[in-house]
Amino acid sequence: MSSFNDQFIYSIVIIAAGYILKKMHVIKEEDGEGLARIIFNITLPALILVTFNDFVMEYSLFLLVIISFAYGLLAAMLGVLLFKGNPSRHAKGMLSMMVPGFNIGLFAFPLVEGIWGREGIQHFVMFDVGNSFIVFGICYFIGSHYAGEETRLDIKTMLLKMTRSIPLMTYIVVLMLNLSGLKLPSFIVETADIISYANMPLSLLLLGIYLNFTIEKKYLRLLFHYMAMKYGLGIFAGFALFFLLPFDDMFNYTVLIGLILPAAMSVLPYAVEFNYDKRFIGTVSNLTIITSFMLIWIIANFMI
């Protein structure tokens, strides 16, 4: 139990450091963009590569891809239905777009690596593969539809979006190498191993840089509707699957925690692209980070 709490304390300290440095104007929030590119394009792919280098694939893990994708579809449909009565078309688009996807690469991986090590990363990588199809396909389509953009959800559009994601392409390459029995040269793996150690602290610092505790009153009603939908559905489905699935604890904890993770980071660039309220979406992203962090701490202390 103490190791779990130690990891949460370390995480809080690093997140707080990023937040304090921003408040002291040592780091600007705009600097987070460059840091995010380093994480998504360098340190996170390195971590994925090293994690799967000697991994013996269990085919049951592919079910995590299916669960993540199926849940995303369900959440998207329910979100569109429940937010249908909102008078603002843009509000419908923002709320519905933020429900299905999860922030796994920046938020979950640092905590999971600290608590469960490489085994945890292996499970959450599989969960994130299904999540990537939702984030780069369904979320993008919902956002564009309510923004009035002429965007069709076809295979070509989805594949084009996904090929631009270096972490997702790394997932696919290392999984193919693993299943085929091929190994990367040792110097590549050793170099990636050194780089991968930077992923956890950089990701947590970035969360602190983007953290914001200001919530404007005009957002409260929309925030309540969104949080009730996202976490009500996630908690219900997560605990139901946790007790029903006939797999080991690591598999079931991946599903339970995976379904209560924060909103996907991709909603921020989507907000810019579709001219949505960036301040509202940023506020929601921050609130989901705080809420998910608290929920995972509770699970770590009372269930694991």
Image: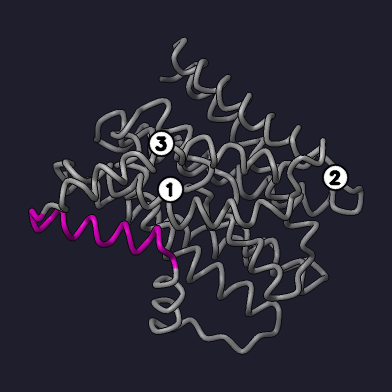
Pointers 1 and 2 in contact (C-beta within 8 Å): no
In the image, 21 versus 126, the foreground residue is 21
Question: Label 1 belongs to which residue?
Answer: 43
Task: Name the mark nearer the viewer: 2 or 3.
Answer: 3
Question: Label 2 belongs to which residue?
Answer: 215
Q: Amino acid at mark 2?
A: Ile
Residue closest to the far top: 2
207 to 300, vertically: above or below: below
Question: Label 3 belongs to which residue?
Answer: 197
Residue 30 position in % (x across, y down): 73, 55
Q: Residue at image x 69%, y 52%?
A: 31
Q: Amino acid at mark 3?
A: Tyr
Q: Residue at image x 91%, y 53%?
A: 218
Q: Point out the stretch of residues depicted in magenta.
A: 165-182
Mark 2 residue element:
loop
- Precedes in sequence: disc 2 or disc 3: 3
